[in-house]
């Protein structure tokens, strides 16, 4: 990466041994231009998933060989020369060589497009099998730890979190032509686009958080599922986009979970060529500029985008140019480019919901074909039918209840770091399933005493973990041991510190794995003056476990929760999906 990566040309933007399932399997193919018969035929294909397991050539670091499969056929692969460092190292990122600043692109639009299209088009059984063979899958989480699953609401519903990843892999002639940077052909890919899509538990609203690609953070330990290579935890100033080259998209998922403590259910990844094919298939998305623009400097830099003032329908490579444009949009930073990308995504979703031009069965088939070829997903959504179900879930949310945001940040040299306070506030709102548009306030859950009687305090086996680390603060040293001693003083003689855990909690929580331990967990909470809402059932623990949160960095009891501000921080630069008047401001130096 160059010395000014945030302002440089390009898109801005744990070992889970089990994958969290979603309700998408129960989704049905809705009536479309293909008709009821096709939808029914698609439904008959349930169980014929045959998940693909190939990992693309650019999906892992140089030097990795074969072991990838698609349709059960081994792909030989070739071993690259060892020792090629990952590109785009962050400050203090281990001395890896930096590659020159080259062009990149945002690819999330193709991902969302793919899902929504699959929610629109049904398919017959044979065609379903063909589409199924197009899909590629990869492991969901390559880290050692998972963020806790969210607690269901009063209706038993849970939110859905999907990480959208754009890979800059130059692993084919087409991707090389579109992405440039010939010297990087076949090198480790970067996750230059990272967006978390949060679908609320009641499916009434959707929130999206994009993370600038130059964000400095700690990438957790990841293990490559193909060759078993272990990538140890990075330093705290490693660029987030390097995570993709450390075993695959599952390491990017692990990185997000470590930073945000948000449980991620699925990922979807697309590359350069996927953007172009999907943008062509949709037939155009309207975007707006307030002046004529030509994104080209006297040195030949820029995306080449050339548009007249006003609204233009863009598709194919022109859509790619829009998503890549930095020179000419506002102040010329990656943050301005992210704003343009948010506008494109909102317009794309509105276009798909309105079914503009999507009336021909042949066109719908083309869309389904391109969608399945463009995506790499986790096994939990690794079939067309599951993607159709997911698309149907996403379609329940209106543009008016869709909110696009950027992770609040502040500059650290030429890079960025999460903004203290604001970044954690945004992450908490998503963790707690609070709509970012400020509508539909949550109703407090009613506390219910367990029917299971608690054991005597001295007989309750209790593990204590230190979860005081936040997105902006390191863990408070020795808190697990200190709290275990405090609990022993209260009569919980079997309280013991678990120093092997690496967890993060905003507020102190007590978890238990089964109903027969619920009473014990509630007894611990009562002894500490904690509300029963802080006691949660979780399969991530093997016994009663108290996780000391950021609210208990010192003292003998957790701080009482003050009334929380549930508003979206201004620094998140929120944009409503219903804003049809949004128009990018053009730098006067790039008009014609």
Image: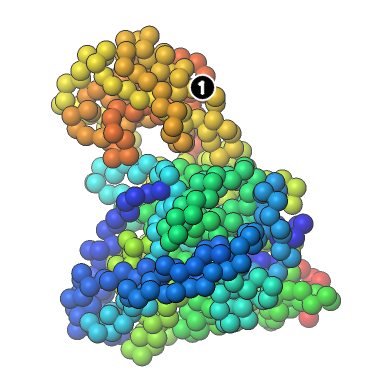
Is residue 406 at least partly visible in the picture?
Answer: no
Reading the image, the residue beneath label 1 is: 478
Name the quadrant containing residue 227. bottom left
| Quadrant including the C terminus | bottom right
> Residue at the spot x=48%, y=79% of the render?
278
Label 1: few (<14), some (14–19) or many (≥20) C-alpha neighbours in 10 Å: few
Counting from the top left corner in percent of width and height, residue 489 is at 38, 9
- Whether 113 is drawn above or below 404: the answer is below
> Residue at the spot x=44%, y=55% of the render?
228
How many numbered marks, from 0 up?
1
Name the quadrant containing residue 569. top right
Does residue 131 appear to the left or right of 206 in the view shown?
A: left
- Whether 234 is drawn above or below 357: the answer is above
Depth check: give the residue in front, 303 or 432. Answer: 303
> Residue at the spot x=43%, y=34% of the render?
501
Does residue 368 appear to the left or right of 312 in the view shown?
A: left
Name the quadrant containing residue 71. bottom left
Counting from the top left corner in percent of width and height, residue 365 is at 35, 85
Scheme of colours in the image: rainbow
| Quadrant including the N terminus | bottom right
Depth check: give the residue in front, 44 or 137. Answer: 137
> Residue at the spot x=57%, y=82% of the render?
174
Is residue 92 at least partly visible in the picture?
Answer: yes
Counting from the top left corner in percent of width and height, residue 583 is at 63, 69
Q: Secondary structure at mark 1?
A: loop
Counting from the top left corner in percent of width and height, residue 63 is at 56, 64
């Amino acid at each position: 990466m160059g010395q000014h990566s945030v302002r440089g040309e390009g898109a801005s933007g744990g070992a889970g041994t089990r994958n969290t399932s979603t309700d998408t399997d129960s989704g049905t193919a809705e009536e479309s231009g293909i008709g009821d018969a096709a939808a029914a035929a698609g439904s008959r294909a349930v169980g014929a998933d045959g998940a693909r397991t190939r990992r693309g050539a650019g999906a892992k670091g140089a030097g990795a060989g074969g072991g990838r499969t698609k349709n059960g056929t081994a792909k030989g692969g070739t071993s690259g020369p060892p020792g090629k460092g990952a590109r785009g190292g962050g400050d203090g990122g281990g001395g890896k060589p930096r590659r020159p600043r080259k062009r990149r692109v945002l690819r999330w639009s193709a991902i969302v497009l793919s899902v929504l299209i699959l929610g629109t088009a049904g398919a017959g059984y044979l065609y379903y099998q063909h589409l199924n063979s197009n899909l590629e899958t990869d492991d969901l989480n390559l880290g050692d730890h998972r963020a806790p699953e969210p607690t269901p609401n009063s209706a038993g519903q849970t939110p859905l979190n999907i990480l959208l990843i754009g890979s800059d892999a130059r692993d084919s002639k087409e991707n090389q032509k579109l992405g440039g940077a010939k010297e990087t052909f076949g090198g480790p890919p970067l996750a230059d686009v990272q967006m978390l899509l949060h679908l609320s538990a009641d499916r009434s609203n959707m929130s999206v958080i994009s993370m600038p690609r130059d964000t400095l953070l700690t990438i957790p330990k990841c293990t490559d599922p193909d060759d078993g290579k272990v990538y140890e935890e990075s330093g705290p100033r490693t660029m987030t986009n390097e995570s993709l080259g450390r075993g695959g998209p599952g390491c990017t998922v692990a990185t997000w979970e470590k930073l945000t403590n948000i449980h991620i259910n699925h990922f979807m990844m697309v590359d350069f060529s996927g953007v172009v094919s999907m943008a062509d298939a949709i037939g155009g998305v309207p975007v707006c500029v307030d002046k004529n623009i030509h994104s080209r400097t006297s040195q030949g830099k820029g995306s080449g985008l050339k548009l007249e003032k006003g609204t233009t329908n863009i598709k194919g490579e022109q859509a790619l140019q829009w998503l890549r444009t930095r020179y000419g949009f506002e102040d010329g930073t990656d943050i301005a480019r992210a704003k343009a990308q948010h506008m494109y995504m909102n317009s794309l979703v509105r276009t798909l919901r309105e079914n503009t031009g999507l009336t021909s069965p042949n066109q719908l088939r083309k869309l389904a074909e391109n969608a399945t070829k463009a995506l790499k997903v986790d096994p939990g959504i690794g079939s067309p039918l599951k993607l159709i179900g997911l698309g149907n879930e996403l379609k329940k949310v209106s543009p008016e209840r869709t909110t696009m945001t950027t992770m609040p940040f502040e500059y650290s040299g030429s890079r960025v770091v999460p903004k203290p306070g604001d970044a954690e506030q945004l992450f908490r709102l998503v963790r707690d399933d609070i709509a970012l548009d400020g509508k539909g306030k949550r109703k407090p859950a009613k506390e219910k005493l367990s029917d299971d009687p608690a054991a005597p305090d001295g007989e309750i086996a209790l593990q204590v973990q230190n979860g005081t680390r936040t997105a902006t603060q390191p863990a408070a040293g020795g808190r697990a041991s200190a709290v275990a001693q405090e609990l022993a003083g209260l009569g919980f003689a079997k309280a013991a510190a678990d120093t092997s855990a690496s967890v993060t909690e905003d507020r102190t929580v007590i978890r238990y794995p089964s109903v027969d331990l619920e009473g014990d967990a509630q007894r611990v909470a009562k002894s500490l003056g904690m509300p029963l809402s802080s006691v949660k059932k979780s399969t991530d623990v093997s016994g009663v476990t108290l996780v000391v949160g950021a609210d208990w960095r010192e003292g003998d009891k957790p701080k009482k929760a003050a009334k929380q501000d549930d508003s979206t921080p201004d620094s998140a630069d929120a944009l409503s999906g219903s804003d049809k008047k949004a128009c990018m401001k053009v730098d006067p130096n790039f008009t014609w």
